[in-house]
Image (cartoon, helix red, strand yellow):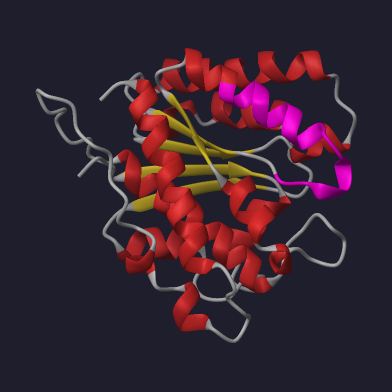
Amino acid sequence: MNATMLRTSILAAAMLASLSLSGTSAGAVDQVNDRAAICCARATRLDPPTPPRTVQTTGLIGDSLSVGLTDDRFQVGPPIQELIASGGRSMWTSTSIGFNLADGLDVLVRRADVVSDTDVVVVALGTNDIVGGVARDSWRRAIDGIVRQVERASPDAIVVWVDLSAPRFGNAAAEFNAILLESAAREPSLAVCGWASNAAANPQWLGSDGLHLTGTGYAARRDVIVACIDDVGFD
């Protein structure tokens, strides 16, 4: 499967997640956790067919929006690593409040031995860079640097990067996402997971500060990311 079709399938899975989760309230736990409703968008294989990719080990690097996925105090339902484990796979996480692009690269360098055994690395970074006023010229270099580091540690791994939703910060998130898509067009190992479109369609997921999420919002973000990981498998 080529890179264009991979990215198309990832975005299709995320859009399907939006349709399944739209209108979910904090009390609708069963609906939020209905993985079957969002997991089944699959890539169309080329002829001859591409052999299925085995996804057994995943990683997640992220900021406070990912802390909300890994700690059950912040969301409806199980943390993302428990949801992944329930499917017979494993996920390592490195998430922290305030993490930015430079922190993500540092994690990948320090944990290269762990990354070497990872099939999919989910990167959910960039929000603190746009919030902190980091120069836009540095975004592309940072994205490319993170992809290169994953390739060095695990040449066959796919980077699934979660795009940004930050309505409080005007066009900055859209600009970052545009650079992310440009990078994905050049990088066969980079796919974009479409969180921003889901968040825009469901403003009730946004917390009172206009940046973080409600419990239902974190559960929705978790499920969108899991759907993107599932779609990388092509199975």
User: What residue span does the magenta drawing correspond to?
Assistant: 165-181
Given the current orientation, which residue lies at the most extreme bottom position? 27
Q: Can you see residue 139?
A: yes
Query: Which is the main secondary structure of the residues drawn in magenta?
Result: helix
Q: Is residue 234 above or below residue 41?
A: above
Q: How many marks can you see? A: 0
Figure quadrant of residue 55: top left
Give how far across and how far down residue 164 sits, in percent. 68, 41
For the C terminus, the quadrant is top left
Q: Is residue 152 above or below residue 173?
A: above
Give how far across and how far down residue 110 sits, in percent. 57, 28
Residue at the (79%, 13%) spot, across then down: 137
Figure quadrant of residue 231: top left
- In this rendering, would 117 be left or right of 110? left
- In this rendering, would 76 be left or right of 37? right
Give how far across and how far down residue 28 sits, in percent. 54, 84
For the N terminus, the quadrant is top left
Q: Is residue 16 magenta?
A: no
Give how far across and how far down residue 117 sits, in percent. 34, 33
Residue at the (72%, 52%) spot, across then down: 64
Residue at the (60%, 16%) spot, across then down: 145
Residue nearer the viewer, 111 or 83? 83
Residue at the (32%, 23%) spot, across then down: 156
Q: Is residue 177 magenta?
A: yes
Q: Can you see residue 223?
A: no
